[in-house]
Image (cartoon, grey):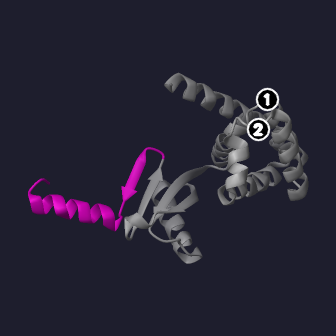
Amino acid sequence: MASKASGIGEIARRYAAAIFELATEKAEIDGVADDFRRIQAMVEDSADLKRLLKSPIFSRKEQALAMAALAKKAEFSDITTNFIALAARNRRLFMLLDVIDRFFEHLSQQRGEVKADVLSAAALNKGQMASLQESLKKTFGKEVSLHTSVDASLIGGLIVRVGSRMIDSSLRTKIQKLQLAMKGIG
């Protein structure tokens, strides 16, 4: 199973590298990045779109037609539209979000940024995000691209992951540590 997952990851990496190279060559990197951000938001907001991408029940033709209509309505760039058509033709739409994630890894690397995955108990406002970004920039010495998500079970605080490093200042973890200390386990 691990080799299948790593094979898929390798294919996604190759697609992302090719798209990144083409978008850079055609000076459309920002347009493609914007298209990809909108696709991520659309997939997150639509269970039907998520099902279309992931489910093998849809034929190649059905996927291609639906995605072509979406690309036209959203007015995606030619690079994005052609990539989506190619992915549908090759039955690779299931890895679309993986390709997009890897594309953004290339973009961050080119811009000298690091990616920070931030999990918070509640949505962060612009001021909190700017403050966190500045703090992480000082810590890592690079521009930081924040990718936020919400998990109410944290109760409060944040969990920040940058590469292999993790900073957990969530109340959930602090409560767990306190419970263990009270039991004499920590």
Q: Which mark is residue 140?
A: none
Where residue 185 appears, as percent x and y from the top left, is 12, 53
Q: CA distance from mark 1 to mark 2?
A: 13 Å
Q: Nearer the viewer, residue 91 or 145?
A: 91
Q: Amino acid at mark 1?
A: Asn
Residue drawn at the location 73% of the way across and 51% of the way down: 49
Q: Nearer the viewer, residue 25 or 35?
A: 35
Asked if residue 156 is positioned above or below residue 184 in the image, the reply reads below
Where residue 177 appears, as percent x and y from the top left, is 22, 60
Q: Give the extent of the magenta segment.
A: 163-186
**Pointer 2 residue:** 58
Please tell me whether mark 1 or mark 2 is closer to you in this view.
Answer: 2
Residue 54 belongs to magenta span: no
Identify the element where label 1 is drawn: loop
Where residue 36 appears, as percent x and y from the top left, is 74, 51
Q: Nearer the viewer, residue 14 or 113?
A: 14
Q: Which mark is residue 90?
A: 1
